[in-house]
Image (cartoon, helix red, strand yellow):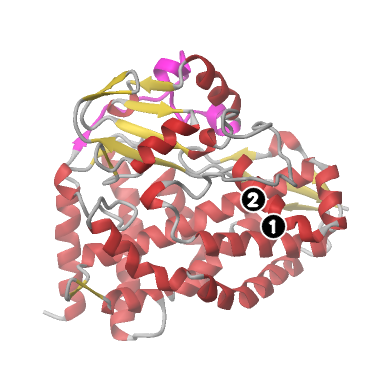
Amino acid sequence: MAADDRFTEDFREAREDELLGTIAEVVTGPVADWATDFSHVEPEWAADPYPIQDDLRQRCPIAHTGRFGGAWLPTRYEDVAAIAYDTERFSSRSIILSNFRPPRELAPIGGSPPISSDPPFHHDARKLLLPAFTKAAVQRQEPATRAFCHSLIDGFAGQEVVDAAADYAQHIPMRVISDMLGFPPEDGPQFRVFVEDLLEGINLPPDERIERVSRLFDYLLVQVHDHIDNPRDDLTTYLLNVELYGQKLGPDHVVGTMALLLIAGIDTTWSAIGSSLWHLAKTPADRERLAAEPALLPTAMEEFLRAFAPVTMARLVKEDMRWHGVDMKADDWILLSFPAANRDPAQFDRAGDVVIDRAVNRHAAFGLGIHRCVGSHLARMELRVALEVWLERIGEFTLADPAAVTWSAGQIRGPRSLPIRIR
């Protein structure tokens, strides 16, 4: 059997084992009470979750739902941080809350290491990725990223109305990550489908969800085979050759990490860029100030990350316990809302306001604890360059139709349609 065929067979066997978990009832529909029946995939949450989170923080800081087989939603910074740092009682073996719980045997590696890994394996799996995401490595990506941003704007030059999410924000991380992984740049449209399949289809019937997610892994296996046949200097070839504990990574580890880098590397940054442009389009005072004081952009960027943090992660309770006044059961989900933590008035002054010159800003947009985003330097570079080029080239811009702005549902929140009028 050829090496690449063996790789595929071993991967599919590992995936079959991963799918031996438990499946909860699919529950959709309006929320009766967010304290006892929350659902982060409902339209009102996608449109504007902040008033809901503020209300919960006041009257029920750790909300519960029977949906998804049982889940908890802490909304205070101190509770979110406590769970993020507590790897003894909370597992990361699945970080996307859905109606499917992978088996406990999947720990400590999980399906997408290192983000799905528990200690002690997590430390060693994460260490493998660090060289690709140092400040120096990211700096080498900046010239190509800046040139690509200019080319995107060249492409819609002369248009009066532009969809800043679909025509600009989404393409930037797609190009950067595809270049790093060595994927064909023309495959970008497929990446958007993969993102939606994995992150927004969490309440689909299990057979349909498995079918959709399989499209991503089928694509990644094609890329693996191409890299086995044609090795080159990129992250995919690196993952195929690097050793952990004296052995090459298993097929499930390689493909799971590739999936993590592709999905997390695209959707989070796409959402952050879009949210920042949305704010500037509807807040002319901040846009004008940044135009007049470009040196303020790095500070403003951190505030956009705090106020519009795109990422919410999930954990699974390891054993029955009473935690901070609530009775959690083994395998209950925890929805670890970094966006809610970032708007906790006990942690941030004027927490609900966007203060672009906020001097002290220890936000949690990139997570807390051992799973803090390994690609934070890359995300910051992409966000900064995307905003610098846009502000340099576009000048004045406003929302063409505020009612036409749509937001993604699920654990990554950002604009999916963002019509902007260019003046």
- What residue lies at 55% left-to-right and 68% top-to-bottom? 175
Residue 324 falls in image quadrant: top left
Q: CA distance from mark 1 to mark 2?
A: 6 Å
Position in image of residue 416 (x %, y %): 60, 46
Give the position of the N terminus as an image quadrant: bottom left
Position in image of residue 78 (x %, y %): 46, 32
- Disc 2 crowd rating (10 Å Cα; few below 14, some 14-19, many 20+) is many
Residue 170 lies in magenta, yes or no?
A: no
Q: Is residue 258 left or right of residue 385?
A: left
What mark, if any, has residue 302 been given in the picture?
2
Residue 190, can we see it? yes
Position in image of residue 410 (x %, y %): 46, 38
Instruction: Specify the segment rendered in magenta.
Output: 22-47
- Disc 1 crowd rating (10 Å Cα; few below 14, some 14-19, many 20+) is some
Residue 65 falls in image quadrant: top left
Q: Amino acid at mark 2?
A: Glu
- What residue lies at 35% left-to-right and 33% top-to-bottom? 334
The vertical placement of 118 against 204, above or below, is below
Q: Are marks 1 and 2 in contact (CB under 8 Å)?
A: yes
In the foreground, 110 or 263: 110
Position in image of residue 306 (x %, y %): 60, 43
- What residue lies at 65% left-to-right and 45% top-to-bottom? 360
Question: The residue tagged with tag 2: helix, strand or loop?
Answer: helix
Q: Is residue 314 left or right of residue 380?
A: left
Q: Amino acid at mark 1?
A: Pro
Q: Is residue 13 left or right of residue 50?
A: left
Residue carrying label 1: 298
